[in-house]
Image (spheres, rainbow, N blue to C red):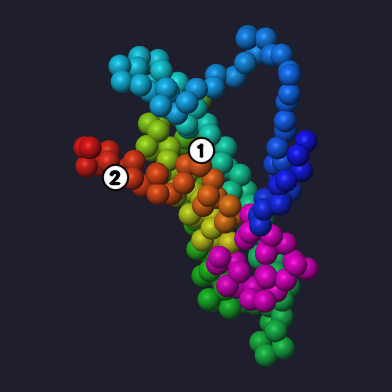
Amino acid sequence: MVENWNHMGLRASGSHETVLDNVWIPPENAVDIRAPSAWAPAGASQADVDANADQQAWMVVLLGSLYDAVARAGYDWIRGFVRERIPGSLGAPLATLPRVQEAIGEITALLHANQALLDDAAARTDAGTPPPPTDSGLLKFTVTGNAIRAVELALQLSGNHGLSRNNPLERHYRDVLCSRIHTPQNDSILVAAGRVALGQ
């Protein structure tokens, strides 16, 4: 193990490098590894296209679920915080303020949309009709964008408390931001979706 994972976020994933040297793997145990250009070459069979769609869908459901879970952890923390935090100038919990209730409602809506999208993609893929790769990319874009927005709203509500290392929200924020650089990245997703929409 090369312990070189020292990122801003997702530190707990321990995504260090593993180096295998002179290790024999029987061909039947090898993972199907190909260059990206070989996944769907011109004239690829429908089975190859379907397998690519299936793999893309499961990867996106996995990543989307990961970052949605980070946002849900932030959601749980902020709900507890606004119920318990009683500023001296207010004399009541922050949860009694309509603007706080509205923000919590917006976070709830974002996470509700994520759940519906992820459940649908998983069910379709389980049924053997995964969404096309472009749609899977848009799912990742939407779910991770919603997750980031949810944690940002929680930070706005918590103020300095949310950025303190004494509370978990700052870690959830760092973790959820990692979704922006997790493949497929937003620029690739949007270019692919734009090409399909324009018939290119």
The disc label shown at residue 37, or none: none
- Identify whether 115 is placed above or below 21: below
Q: Residue at x 38, y 31 (%)?
A: 132
Quarter-wise, where is residue 197 in the image?
top left
Q: Residue at x 71, y 14 (%)?
A: 24
Residue 47 spot, x, y in % from top left: 40, 15
- Quick one: SS at disc 2? helix
- Quick one: SS at disc 1? helix
Residue 11 spot, x, y in % from top left: 71, 51
Q: Amino acid at mark 1?
A: Val
Q: Which residue is mark 1?
A: 60
Whether residue 164 is visible to the viewer of this picture, yes or no, is yes
Q: Which residue is mark 2?
A: 194
Q: Quadrant of the N terminus?
A: top right
Q: Residue at x 30, y 16 (%)?
A: 43
Instruction: Find the distance from the CA under tag 2 to the CA under tag 1.
Output: 19 Å
